[in-house]
């Protein structure tokens, strides 16, 4: 079955380090340099006090979402995708169902027995 070129690609990276965690669909593989550049653009904006949610180029549409200062999801699509924020939220929700919120965002949700 031939691959559809217009299918969106979901990238998941560690927010602090930019380390790629996964890419779906896994083929064609997104080059590490592209993942680093996309994450770098998002971090640069955050350091300047701007929240980058979506961007468009003549050949791609991009959307970013951070979850708990732990995980950043990036949606990369060659054509406009309806509701990119909803797609990213649904992907994170699926990850929570499989792994649990404490595994995905441990430092943001953890509290000791004293409540601190």
Image: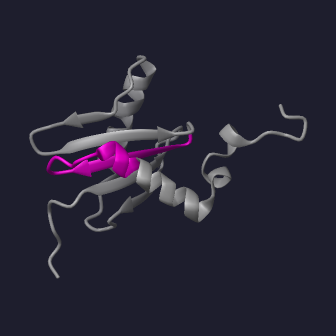
Query: Residue drawn 20% across and 43% down?
Result: 61
- Left or right of 47 in this view: 116: right
Front residue (pair 16, 95): 95
Outermost residue on the bottom side: it is: 1
Residue 45 locus on image (x, y percent)? 37, 24
Which corner quadrant of the image does residue 40 belong to?
top left
Residue 53 locus on image (x, y percent)? 33, 33
Vertical arrangement, residue 43 with respect to residue 110, above or below: above
Outermost residue on the right side: it is: 114
Outermost residue on the top side: it is: 48
Which corner quadrant of the image does residue 63 belong to?
top left
- Image quarter (top left, top right, bottom left or bottom right) of the C terminus: top right
Residue 112 locus on image (x, y percent)? 85, 40
Query: Residue drawn 53% across and 37% down?
Result: 16
Q: How is the image coloured?
A: one colour
Q: How many marks?
A: 0
Residue 100 locus on image (x, y percent)? 63, 57
- Image quarter (top left, top right, bottom left or bottom right) of the N terminus: bottom left
Vertical arrangement, residue 43 with respect to residue 99, above or below: above
Residue range of the region highlighted in magenta in the rendering: 70-88
- Left or right of 11 in this view: 6: left
Outermost residue on the left side: it is: 58
**Residue 85 lies in the magenta-colored region:** yes
**Residue 25 lies in the magenta-colored region:** no
Query: Residue drawn 56% across and 56% down?
Result: 96
């Amino acid at each position: 079955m031939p691959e559809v070129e217009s299918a969106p690609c979901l990238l998941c990276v560690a927010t602090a380090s930019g380390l790629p965690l996964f890419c779906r669909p896994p083929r064609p593989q997104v080059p590490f340099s592209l993942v680093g550049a996309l994450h770098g653009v998002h971090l640069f904006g955050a350091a300047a006090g701007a929240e980058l949610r979506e961007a468009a180029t003549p050949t791609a549409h991009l959307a970013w979402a951070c979850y708990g200062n732990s995980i950043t999801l990036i949606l990369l699509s060659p054509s406009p995708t309806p509701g990119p924020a909803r797609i990213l939220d649904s992907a994170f929700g699926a990850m929570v169902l499989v792994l649990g919120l404490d595994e995905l965002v441990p430092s943001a949700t953890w509290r000791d027995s004293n409540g601190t």
